[in-house]
Amino acid sequence: MPEPKQPEKDPVKKLDATIATRPTRRRRAAAFQAYVLIASVVFIGLAVVARNVPYFSIDLTVTRAIQGYHGVVFDRVMFGLSWLGFQPQTLVLCVLLVALLFVAGLRWEAVVTLFAAGATGVSTLVKLLVDRPRPSVDLVYVLREISMSGFPSGHVLTFTALCGFLAFLVYTLLKPSWGRTTLLATAFVLVILMGFSRIYQGQHWFSDVMGGYLLGSLWLALTIWLYRWGKLRFFTHQPVAPEIPAASTT
């Protein structure tokens, strides 16, 4: 006798089993919204003050502390990271990442990565509005003087948004593995060290860097929102990691 056919699992119920409970979802949403609100208020306040104050005492203290270390390896890492954050290096890196995601079949992910890289344009706009002078050679060591406004750090802003989104994709799309953990750790270290490199080379104050982290995290939050909003509307049948709307499975 043939074995009775097992009933197919309802994909909607299968998906529902992986979803957090409603109270948990509400708490997470509230925490996320609170962070966005607080980060926005802090960034705006910092930007207003930075427009009128060339630097803070903590800026000078942090810069001299970081520049006080002169390890050869540290110096090369700092130089390499800062070099990577300038154009056209950042543009080339972004194009390569987008092309890699697209060829891998992650079409919507590739599109939204372009949006994440748009943080560079946001940085330029805010710099024009704040117009804050960069560290001067009579206060700290400056590797190379740059005339453009220093607040916020464009390197930090762009890497926070771009590496942050790539880390989000790695965390949500890949199964737990050493490779996944390595990629997440690498993204985190790159973002943190980028801030150190800008201060070490005397091209940004500590408050410029913090402004970059704040605005970069806000742009990252907007990028993730766009990704999740569009995931159910565009490229639902892409080769890899498609997202089928729940309504179509009933």
Image (tube, grey):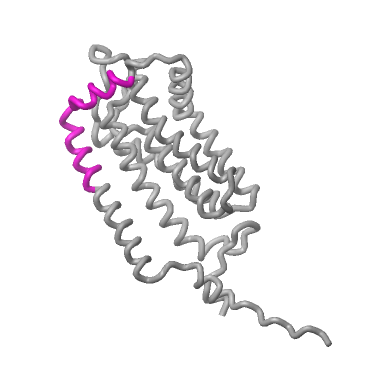
Does 169 appear above or below 205? below
Q: Is residue 46 magenta?
A: yes
Q: Is residue 236 magenta?
A: no
Quadrant housing residue 3: bottom right
Q: Is residue 51 left or right of residue 13?
A: left
Does 249 appear above or below 95? below
Q: Residue 205: x percent and y percent?
A: 28, 26
Q: Quadrant of the N terminus?
A: bottom right
Q: In the orientation shown, which residue stands out farthest toward the right?
A: 1
Q: Which residues are magenta?
A: 41-66
Q: Residue 152: x percent and y percent?
A: 30, 34
Q: How many marks?
A: 0
Q: Quadrant of the C terminus?
A: bottom right
Residue drawn at x 56%, y 46% is 180
**Predominant SS of the magenta segment:** helix
Q: Residue 145: x percent and y percent?
A: 33, 17
Q: Is residue 246 left or right of residue 70?
A: right
Residue drawn at x 33%, y 66% is 26
Quadrant housing residue 49: top left
